[in-house]
Image (tube, rainbow, N blue to C red):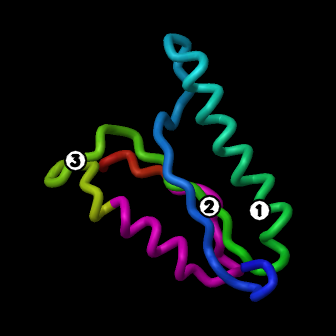
């Protein structure tokens, strides 16, 4: 993608806020966000859109966390004009 100068690399994760009860999981989720930032710094200038979609609840069809709705976030990130790129979208089910 970097050689071609275009493309999208989108990571999906959960747990939008750190939780003291889940320290190790919270650290992992923070690591995902940091990974996206670092990949963006490395590959964004060459035209590759790096982003994450953070899902704030259990994914299930027909709910506020329907996979089709979450997929729409991925699509919108992928087709964003370069001057409007976002690195993260939070799907909170609302």
Label 2: state its secondary structure: strand
As displayed, is residue 14 above or below residue 64?
A: above
Q: Which mark is drawn over residue 69?
A: none
Q: Quadrant of the N terminus?
A: bottom right
Q: Which mark is drawn over residue 60?
A: 3
**Residue found at x 75% / y 88%:** 4
**Residue found at x 65% / y 35%:** 30
Mark closer to the chain start, 3 or 1: 1
Range shown magenta: 70-89
Q: Is residue 65 left or right of residue 74?
A: left
- Residue 74, magenta (yes or no): yes
Q: Tell me the distance, in whole angstroms, between the alpha carbons under discs 3 and 2.
A: 22 Å
Determine which residue is flagged by label 2: 51
Report the magenta stretch's main SS: helix
- Callout 1 environment at 10 Å: few (<14), some (14 to 19), or many (20+)? some
Q: Is residue 36 left or right of residue 52?
A: right
Q: Are marks 1 and 2 in contact (CB under 8 Å)?
A: yes
Mark closer to the chain start, 3 or 2: 2
- Residue 65, magenta (yes or no): no
Q: Are marks 3 and 2 in contact (CB under 8 Å)?
A: no
Mark closer to the chain start, 1 or 2: 1
As displayed, is residue 68 above or below residue 54?
A: below
User: In front here: 67 or 82?
Assistant: 67
Determine which residue is flagged by label 1: 40
Q: Tell me the distance, in whole angstroms, between the alpha carbons under discs 3 and 1.
A: 30 Å
């Amino acid at each position: 993608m970097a050689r071609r100068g275009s493309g999208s690399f989108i990571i999906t994760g959960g747990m939008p806020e750190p939780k003291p009860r889940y320290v190790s999981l919270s650290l992992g989720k923070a690591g995902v966000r940091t990974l996206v930032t670092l990949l963006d710094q490395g590959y964004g200038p060459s035209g590759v859109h790096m982003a994450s979609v953070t899902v704030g609840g259990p994914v299930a069809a027909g709910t506020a966390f329907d996979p089709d709705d979450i997929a729409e976030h991925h699509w919108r990130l992928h087709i964003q004009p370069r001057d409007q790129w976002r690195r993260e979208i939070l799907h909170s089910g609302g």
